[in-house]
Image (cartoon, helix red, strand yellow):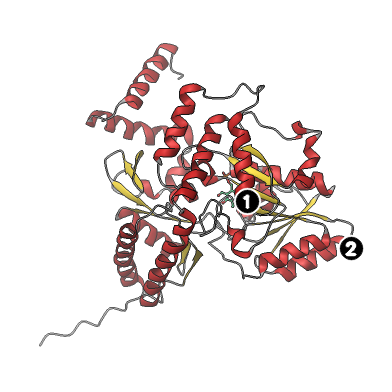
Amino acid sequence: MKATPQDILKETQHTLDLIAKRELAEDDKKYLSEITTAHYTNYVNPGILEYRKSVSTEYASIEWSDSANGFTDLKGRKYLDLLGGYGIYNVGHRHPKVVEAVINQLNRQALHSQELLEPFRAILAKLIADITPGELQYSFFGNSGAEAVEGAMKLAMLHTGRKSFIAATSGFHGKTLGALSATAKAKFRQPFLPILPDCYHVPYGDADYIESVLISSDEVGNDIAGVILEPIQGEGGINVPPDDYFPRVRDLCDRYGALLIVDEVQTGMGRTGRMFCVDHWNVVPDIMCLGKALGGGVMPIGAFVSNKVIWEQLFSEPWLHSTTFGGNPLACVAAIANIHVLLEEKLPEKSEKLGNEFMAKLKALRRRFPKLCVDVRGKGLMIGIEFPTDAIGFEVSKGLFDNGVLVAGTLFSAKTIRIEPPLTLTTAEMNQAVSILEKVLKEVNGRHFETKKPAVAKR
Ligand SMILES: Cc1ncc(COP(=O)(O)O)c(C=O)c1O
């Protein structure tokens, strides 16, 4: 039965009071715990509860507040954040400069009229032109990574007049229909096929394969509008390509008239030790997609960025692509503060240095547990640890969770757990995480790979 308007007023007022409280009473915590799981079951999706580590402990762990490089749940349990919200917390949690910018903007104006010009959208677009490589210059702002990919694919079609794309196996670009055509996981795509019918998936890291598809597509008159790739595959399992891959793909795109679309939604904003991952190889894409950490871990914002020649398609028809909340002032000021903090605190450099140290320690653990730990790979603070099976990967990440360290598998499998902490992680926090991981690996290794000594018969 639906609640009456009076009941709804009571419930919303009670909730607003809870939101406003600095400290919750035990009764408040109990109420929130109970209604959160109950409402997930009845109004969000009960299926989600099956998948969350947070409900596999003795109590359901419920989001409540940020702490320095982590979270505190409703019951006051602290977690060190090695997951970084799947790559959104590059400047840390609630960085004071990002929060201050958003509050200042909020105190003046929340959202935009949609009709006047927005100063902070303009300033952000200029800043993005300054920090992205080569001639990348014009930006369109949306609200998510998938939206950035949608726009990038549409722009490639407009500019080239072609309709087909090349993407990579194990690639992830989002789940809206256009982005889903480029995403590679069968389970996510099959119910919605044919999506964009002419999207060919080639093995990631193999430039020769891309060339052969470009040649055959050319021959049959089904020319390729764009080649869309992640510089390091995140959801596919932290897959790092060979160093010559992107330079070769750049060259192939030029030769066959396809645009190179680089999806930096997860790798961008300093994550891999450079502001953008393609900077490792000095490659300039035709279109770059941004999202996740762009909003400083405070506001959602995505963007696609391209050069003037390509963007000209949109000069005469700027409404060919638009969205109500895209480029809103709260998101733009958060992104401006985010860029400021990344540069001021030299976070890309820090990511490279700390990432190298972290990786060396993880590789040393790998040598100690060779049957358990199959591989350690990554760049900067985008690191994957691979285990022999999904089940073992989940056991390790659950063990870490039980010990207050947050990590997760990737969307393609739980076999590889990802380490994507805030780039503000301290050396002490890294060491703490490594020693907790060592403890968890010992336990899991003991359960799976150490043969029990035969009991010695007593005389
Ligand atoms: C590389 C990449 N592209 C696009 C997306 C989609 O972003 P969103 O979830 O914000 O739509 C993701 C999300 O994980 C991603 O990792």
Q: Tell me if 87 is positioned left or right of 191 in this view.
A: left
Question: Which of the 4 image quarters holds residue 28?
Answer: top left
- Identify the residue under disc 2: 219
Q: CA distance from mark 1 to mark 2?
A: 35 Å
- Pick whichever of labels 1 and 2 is earlier in the sequence: 1
Where is residue 274 drawn, in percent x and y? 54, 58
Above or below 37: residue 432: below
Quadrant position of residue 104: top left
Location of residue 276 by image quarter: bottom right
Around disc 1, counting alpha carbons within 10 Å, would you say few (fewer than 14), some (14 to 19), or many (20 or more)?
many
Which element type, helix, strand or loop, lies under badge 1? Answer: loop
Q: Position of residue 285 (x, y in %)?
A: 69, 55
Where disc 2 sits, the SS reads helix
Which circle marks residue 253 in the picture?
Answer: none
Query: Does 151 sit above or below residue 22?
Result: below
Whether residue 76 appears in this view of the structure is yes
Asked whether, in this view, residue 54 is left or right of residue 299, the answer is: left
Q: Which residue is mark 1?
A: 132
Q: Quadrant of the C terminus?
A: bottom left
- In percent of width and height, residue 148 lies at 64, 43
- Can you say whether 374 is above or below 256 in the image? below
Count of picture labels: 2
Classed neighbour count for the residue bearing mark 2: other residues with Cα under 10 Å, few (<14), some (14–19), many (≥20): few
| Residue at the bottom extreme, as displayed | 459
Q: Residue most toward the top? A: 6
Q: In this view of the protein, which residue sits in the foreground, 114 or 229? A: 114
- Of the residues shown, which amino acid type is indicated by label 2? Glu
Look at the image and tell me in which quarter the N terminus lies: top left
